[in-house]
Amino acid sequence: MKRKVIPYPQARLENLDADVGIELPAGWDNQKRIHVIPKFLIIGAQKCGTTALSRWLSVHPNLQTMPLEWHFFDEVTNLKTDWSRYVLNPYFYLRDPQQVFYTFEKTPDYFDKANSKGVSAARLIHQMMPSAKFILLLRNPTSRAHSVYKMRVRQIASPLQYSRLADRQLQHIERALSLDQFSPSQSDVIPFTEMVKALMRQSHTGDQHALFTKEEQRMLTIGQYAKHLQNWFKYFDRNEQFLILFMEDFQKNPFEVMKRVLDFIEVPQINYHSITEKKQDQLWELTGFNNILNIIKNDKKPAWLNAYLGPMDTEAKDLLDNYFAPWNEKLVDLLPDQTIPWMDGKK
């Protein structure tokens, strides 16, 4: 497989693209090193199974990725000068050029976020890798919003559960040292139905000084899928560069979905049935969509929190279903070739 490789001194934003290699001068071992821009990105959406999908892909012998979300394109403000901070990170260094075909990255926030100057991640990505491919996972936006709420509740109860430490043993040590020092109060948590009502009021009034921040408002706004997709389609070809999947389908038939994914990114098919049998302990996400917090055993959460982590009540579901109804209809119009699971088979 032949890829374009540019010596680092000659590399500029203008001559970069997906799967382009940047060659660094030989180091102490007289070996040149090539860092490769991702061939594809998993761009979202948040709480739609992107971590599970990334884990499935990470076991493919011809792919290489990073363990954490990078968030480069929703944070960078000067791409012309800072592009090397993205490309020359250790995770894009091609460890085995004979074995690894492509690098990739997963950051769900790219789907709907912009940087501090209001430039969308989609536009910034287009400037660096216009020929990249994108995988997008969506789910019923009502269920997605409730999943985000439960994640926030867990963060309040045990903020270190979302540590960015990659080493599992260090995570356990961190929690052992810190969890006993944090005791959340029930007053710190707003019931889901009340939060939904308040978020909707704030979205209607546009009050920037209301109870919830813009980040918290994303509980609703991310679910406006059609709006965000229309922005992406301004920069990238819908038919050639996008694979749009649904979490409901991934849960129901992960092996069939993975076959589609590997065909889309043009790597050989592998036997995921065999992998899930042999490596179930290490690759727990291959067999389901358990929250990553389930890895932590004997977690210390106050008993009253359980009421906030239960099923969504009917009132909240009705409110959200009505809120998302027009956006769901727009999504149907935008994706006429796809069956959207939560839309009762509408096309």
Image (cartoon, grey):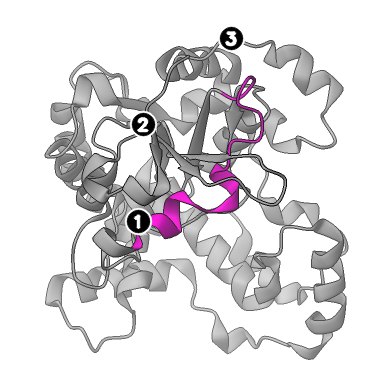
- Residue ID at (56%, 62%): 151
Q: Estimate the x, y position of residue 315 in percent, counting from the top left.
A: 38, 58
Kindly indicate the quadrant of the structure image that contains residue 185. Answer: bottom right
Query: Please, is residue 64 above or below residue 240 in the view?
Result: below
Q: How far apart are marks 3 and 1 (CA)?
A: 32 Å
Look at the picture and state if 199 lies above or below 245. Answer: below
User: Could you say where residue 62 lies in the image, as x and y percent from the top left?
Assistant: 60, 22
Inspect this view and state whether residue 149 appears.
Answer: yes
Q: Is residue 154 above or below residue 295?
A: below
Crowding at dot 1, Cα within 10 Å, few <14 / some 14-19 / many 20+, comes out as: some
In front: mark 3 or mark 1?
1
What numbered label is drawn on residue 342?
A: 2
User: Residue at position x 24%, y 19% from top?
Assistant: 240
Q: Residues within 10 Å of mark 2 (few under 14, many from 20)?
A: some
Residue 92 image point, x, y percent: 54, 43
Count neighbours of disc 3 (C-alpha within 10 A) and say few if under 14, some if 14 to 19, many if 20 or more: few
Left or right: where 26 falls relative to 146 = right
Q: Nearer the viewer, mark 3 or mark 2?
A: 3
